[in-house]
Structure formats: C-alpha cells, structure tokens
Image (tube, grey):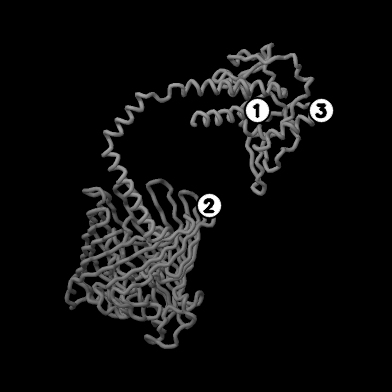
Amino acid sequence: MAKYLLASASGMGFLCLIVGFSPVQALPNLEIADKNVAVNQDDGSYQKNDSHQSDLANNISSQLLIANENQKNLPSVKQQQKNQDLGVDSAVNFWQQIIPQSASSSPTSDKLAQVTSVSQLSDVQPTDWAFQALQSLVERYGCIAGYPNQTYRGNRAMTRYEFAAGLNACLERINELIATATGDLVKKEDLATLQKLQEQFAAELATLRGRVDAVEARTAELEANQFSTTTKLNGEVIIAGVGASGGAPNDSDPNIILVNRVRLNLTTSFTGKDSLITGLQAYNFLGGADGQGSLQQSLGLASPLLSASSARTSFEPQFPGLNVNTLSSVGANSVQLYKLLYIFPVANKLTLFAGTAAETSDAFPAITPFNGEGQESISRFANLNPVLRVSGGTSGTGLASAAGFIFNISPNLDLRALYGSVNANLPEKSASEAVPGVSTTPLGAGLFSGSSIIATQLTFKPIPALDIGLNYAHSYHEINILATGLVSSDIGALAGVATGTPLTLNSVGGTVTWRLSPKIALSGYGAAIFVDAASNSVDASTTFTSWMAGVHFRDLFKPGNTAGILFGQPLYRSDTGGSAQLTPTGDNRATPYHLEAYYRLQVSDNISITPGAFVLFNPEGNSNNETTTVGVLRTTFTF
C-alpha cells in the first residue's frame, strides 16, 4: 500500500513541476481563470479571497482544453518575467492562465530526445531563473527531454504531445525509483529479529504501557477538576514577630507581638495579553481610628488619628483595623478585597488599566531593589519613594478607584499616569461628624468631588546598569492629611490648622538605582511634598522633604539570599508659611533619621526568613522621644 501511495504522491509532485517549468507562454494582461486568486508577478506570492472557495486543482484539465480551443484567436506574446533572480514557485505559475502556441510554432518534425545533463541544452544558461529546477529534473531524476538540435526552447509554448512525452518520462523514472527502493525493503531475517526483541522486552513494554495509561488517566482527572483554564492562583503568607524599645519618654517598652498577613491573588486572562487581577487578603494588625492596639501607639509615636508613624513595618496596612472610607472597624483576620484591577493593551506601545481597588504601585515600577513587603526591606520607609504613597497610594487595602495608561515610548523609556478617586463609590458625604469638622466619610464622596490624585512617572534606563524614575503627583484631600502613613505628622500636615481643612498637594520625587555589579547595587530616593490649604478662609502652607540611600546585595553568602543596609531622613517639615506651624506645640524640633539593616535567607523556592532591625533617631522629628529600635523576624511563604 505504501508503495502505491508513494507513487501517487510523487507522480502528482512531478506533474506540477512539469507543468510549471515546461516551455510555456503567458499572456501578461489576461485575467486569472479563478478570480479568487491574486498573483503578484514581482514576488511570486498569491492570495485567496475567502468569500469564494473554488478548487482550481480539480479543473486543470478543463482549463487546458479551453485554452487549446481558443489558441487560434489569441496572438502570441512574449512572456514577461519581472524578477529573473527570484525562483518563482512553480505552484504559483501553475495557477496562471496557460496558452499554448499554435501548432506552426512547434514543427511536428522535431522529436524530443532524453538528455542526461542540463549542459546538453545549449539555450539553457546558469543565469536563467529556472536553471536549478531544470538541473534537478535532468540530472537527479532524468525525466526532461530536449530537441534533437540540443535546445530546450524554454520561452515558447509546448504542444500536448510534448507534454505527454515529458510526463511519461517522469512517471517511468518514478516507477524505477520505487522499485529500487522497495525491492528488498523487509527481509525474513529482519522480521525474526524484531519478533525476538519483542519477546525479550515484553515485561518492559507492559510496564511502559501501564505507565502511559496511568498518565492518561491522571491527565484526564486534572483536566476535569482544574480550577480554571483562564485563571491562575498565587499567594503569599507572612508571619512575623515584632518587638520594639524606646519611643516617647516615660513609656514602657511594648510586648513582642506576633502578626500575620495572607494574600491570595487570582490572575485571569481572556485574550492572553490582558490581566484581570483579583486580590483577597486577611491580617491581624490592629489600630482603628485612634490607633488602639497598634505597636506604634504603644511606643507613643503614633498620631492621635489613624495611627500614622515612622515605626511601621513594610507589610502593615496603612490603616490597620479600619475602613477609612466610612471609619468603620475591620475585624482581625477578616477577609477583604484589596485589589481589583484590569490591565489590557490597546496598541503596540500603549496599555490601559482600570479598577475599583488599586494602588499606585500597581502601575508604577518601584526602581529601588529594597521594595518588597514580604521579601526585602522590613520598614515602610525603605520600600518606596514617599511620592508614591501620597493620597493613600500604597495603603495596602486597595483604597482608590483608578484608571490610567502605560506608554512604552522605547525599550529604555516609558511614561505612566493615573487618576485615582478614594471614595468613588459613595454618592454623597455623611452629614454626621466623627471629630469636629470631619465627616464620618472623611475622604469625601463621588468620582470627581472627593479626595483624588493625578500621578505620573517617567522611567528611563540611560545605560543598562542605571535605572531612574521621576515622579509627580497633584492631589486634593478633603481633610488635613498627607495620607502616606509614614510619620505621625502625616496627620495634621498643616500644623496648627484644623483637621477638617482641605488641602492641595504637589509632590515631586526621583528614585535611582545603580548596579555596580550583578550582585551589588546602590539605590536611593529624594522627595518633596508642597502642601497648601485649599480653603479660602485659611492661608497656610508646609513643605515636607525626605531622602534615603543604601546598598543592596544579591546572592550574599549563598545564591538566592539578599541583604540591605540603608540610611535616610523620614518625612520632615522643612518650611512653613502663613498660619501653619513649623514645630507643633510641645515638640523639641530635631531632624529625624532612619538606619536599617536586614538579611533575607532563602530557605527554599517558596520559603524565606528575614531577620532585620531599624533604628529611629529623633523619632517623629522630636528630640524629646527616645531613640527607638524595632526588630523584625519575618517568615514568608509563597505559592
């Protein structure tokens, strides 16, 4: 059976070659017989019109017959070949309308003679576009015939007699090749050897068959019970022990606490290029509206409202135990939706994103290698530039509804921007007050009338070892806060001004990372936040500044382990204007500093342990506070 299949397939292939390379003449302006095929004479390509599905291959014979009947009425024209160096596919030429020359152009006295070398054909030159094809048919298959005068006449039409003679020669050659190749294909000795091997390896073959059956059954079970064909699940579990000493004068050191944070992220793709991110989390940090139960409050370093502090760890939410939208409490380890964001490309260099639970860090790259709440630095100060945290931009609870774009200008330059609204889901503010002048919906209401932010970041890489990020943010706040959660002066940013005073903020910052080697990098940031009262009845302004610098190590002592040492100044009032105070009443003004060191031990692919500590000098910019040390032992599980 294989023998006849081989003969049939080979015969059809040679038929196409014969028709394609035989001496023919094409009318250059004649339409193709099947109008569903468009032939490009320059490159030999063709396209089909899907609205018509004619099968030209089944009508080859009828086309040739029609052409032969019309040959007496068609003038002979010279074939036009636009690209002599391009080996045009014979299958493309085959779809062209074939018009044989009149019988008078091919004397019947000429007889075809078999040739054994293409060099025997005097009118075929190596520069001819079909030279290699003719050479293969002559010297490899021996089925091309020439005229007695040693010419091939490749530029003229052939008669049906000539076609029959060439085709017959090729078919005879095919039969010879098949007979030679299959005459002694399988011997009796080979069959006996095969049978013996089968008997010797019968046990192994049976075992292999069983394993294949088991794999097929297991695969079927997994396919039947898989979670989703479009969604992937990953998670992170952080369990940490935190202890601290120092803080406000006359306060005793707090107890060591054990805290956790669990996150599950579902990433769904509908097109293969887009991503719908749904994040769930639970944690047992406490704080609430007044900071009760938080480590910072025990140290005496927290603000009286919302527990903002420089003693906060990296993996702690900005508003622990509190839904800041409505000032309602959140129970320990209750499950919350902390992220809901859809990211989708709309052009080659443009990607859009939108979501009702989003953070600035979802869209803006961090630049610094210290970023990583569960893997890198242990303090909130070291993780990100403060400009990214303005307006609750990294609350840890998906505080804002946001929409924006990512524009990849070049491989080394991209621009990103977003608009975020904190209480976009609330139609109106509450009439009741939580504290004097502050509603129980302190961040306002509505997509455009409540607290909001417009933020941008330009990220570029001038050289492979250098990353730079430049940030700007303009925001409006319904109350007198920065909403960074970094220092206690975040609440009551305009010192001496009522808490219910609305603000406008203009924040600028830059982050730089310079990789000295694949394993050592220098990184730092600088930030300035310009705060102005947005009320016509209040004239007040304040400038906050912050900076950080450090060195990061990769594969320290063991591959996979990382470490960091960093030093900097937390947010600090550097200037004020109008009725704003530079130093709150009762404070002894002093520049605060932050010193941190940590080492992450990668126990396995999914488990890491990070011991570390940070020291606060002049905590919260007040030298009355004692130097404070916060120690952390963090264990992170990822899956």
Quadrant in which residue 396 is drawn: bottom left
Residue at the spot of label 1: 19
Amino acid tagged 2: Asn
The x and y percentages for residue 608 are: 24, 57
Q: 6 and 47: which one is in front?
A: 6
Crowdedness near tag 3: few (<14), some (14–19) or many (≥20) residues, C-alpha within 10 Å: few
As drawn, the label of residue 72 is 3
Distance in Å between CA atoms under marks 1 and 2: 45 Å
Distance in Å between CA atoms under marks 1 and 3: 21 Å
Question: Mark 3 falls on what kind of element?
Answer: helix
Q: Give the mark nearest the N terminus, 1 or 3.
A: 1
The x and y percentages for residue 383 are: 32, 61
Q: Give the mark nearest the N terminus, 3 or 2.
A: 3
Amino acid tagged 3: Lys
Q: Which is in the foreground here, disc 1 or disc 2?
A: 1
As drawn, the label of residue 348 is 2
Q: Residue at x 24, y 72 (%)?
A: 623
